């Protein structure tokens, strides 16, 4: 087993820790593929997530494989562990240090983007908590707050990542990938679903503040 200090004082282990993020984004439902919820193929097993959709059993508290909340917040926590060890990460030689920070920044923004696309505004957590931390119960941020954070993080990642990788690092996220994800988030934020959606007027925080913009902003 490895300790936190052991990982982040070793450049190769630190790289492995960040590289782990490439295995985390969801793509379908593991063996139960997305093709099972259309007429392309049929799912034979009633325990698979596709079955609940095809039989009309999907509900807010029964999302099956579509529920990414716990997994993606666990991934965000792991990214925050990386950022909490920046004093050790800073000892890694360039350009490796910059692109590792860029990758961790990219993936945390990606996880938040997927959470926002699924749930609207979500709590933005950028640090670690102790079990008795009185600030642990963070309230949900507005959709606009989340978009601003995600866009700024993708921009930051683009400034740290190289334009391309070669050799054994080919396929890692690049400057272009970060800017593409930034563009995607801005495109979604400009959609009528999130930009002046009065049908979501009832989605408010405990003070009655709207979590989705009620006024259309043409500049988006």
Image: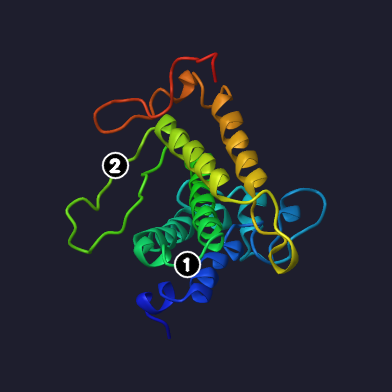
First reached walking from the N terminus: tag 2 or tag 1: 1
Say few, some or many: other residues with alpha carbon within 10 Å of mark 2 (under 14 / 14 to 19 / 20 or more): few
The quarter holding residue 70 reads bottom left
What colour-coding does the image apply?
Answer: rainbow
Name the residue nearer the viewer: 64 or 58.
64
Q: Quadrant of the C terminus?
A: top right
Percent from the top left, x then y, of residue 176? 67, 44
**Figure label count:** 2
**Taking 51 as reference, is 205 left or right?**
left
Q: Which residue is mark 2?
A: 139
Question: Measured along the vertical axis of the image, is residue 130 above or below residue 213?
Answer: below
- Residue at figure coordinates x 25%, y 33% from the top left: 206
**Taking 194 as reference, is 208 left or right?**
left
Name the residue nearer the viewer: 68 or 35.
68
The quarter holding residue 180 reads top right
Q: CA distance from mark 2 to mark 1?
A: 36 Å
Q: Quadrant of the N terminus?
A: bottom left
Percent from the top left, x then y, of residue 181? 61, 41
Name the mark on residue 9: none
Name the secondary structure under disc 2: loop
Q: Among all residues in the image, which is located at the extreme right?
A: 40
Question: Measured along the vertical axis of the image, is residue 100 above or below residue 205?
Answer: below
Say few, some or many: other residues with alpha carbon within 10 Å of mark 1 (under 14 / 14 to 19 / 20 or more): some
Question: Measured along the vertical axis of the image, is residue 3 above or below residue 216?
Answer: below
Percent from the top left, x then y, of residue 170? 72, 62
- Residue at figure coordinates x 63%, y 46% from the top left: 175
Q: Among all residues in the image, which is located at the extreme bottom?
A: 1
Name the secondary structure under disc 1: loop
**Taking 208 as reference, is 91 left or right?**
right
Name the residue nearer the viewer: 181 or 213.
181
Q: Which residue is mark 1?
A: 92
């Amino acid at each position: 087993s490895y300790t936190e200090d052991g990982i982040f004082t070793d450049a190769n282990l630190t790289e492995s820790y960040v590289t782990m993020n490439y295995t985390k984004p969801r793509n379908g439902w593991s063996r139960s593929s997305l093709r099972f919820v259309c007429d392309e193929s049929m799912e034979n097993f009633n325990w698979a997530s596709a079955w609940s959709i095809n039989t009309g059993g999907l509900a807010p508290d029964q999302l099956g494989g579509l529920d990414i909340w716990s997994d993606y917040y666990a991934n965000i926590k792991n990214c925050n562990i990386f950022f909490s060890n920046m004093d050790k990460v800073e000892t890694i030689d360039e350009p490796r240090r910059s692109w590792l920070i860029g990758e961790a920044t990219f993936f945390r923004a990606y996880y938040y983007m997927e959470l926002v696309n699924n749930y609207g505004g979500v709590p933005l957590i950028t640090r670690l908590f102790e079990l008795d931390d009185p600030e642990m119960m963070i309230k949900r941020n507005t959709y606009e707050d989340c978009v601003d954070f995600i866009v700024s993080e993708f921009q930051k990642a683009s400034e740290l990542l190289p334009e391309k990788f070669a050799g054994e690092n080919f396929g890692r996220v690049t400057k272009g990938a970060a800017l593409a994800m930034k563009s995607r988030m801005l495109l979604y934020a400009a959609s009528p679903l999130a930009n002046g959606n009065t049908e979501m007027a009832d989605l408010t925080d405990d003070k009655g503040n709207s979590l989705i913009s009620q006024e259309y902003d043409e500049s988006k």
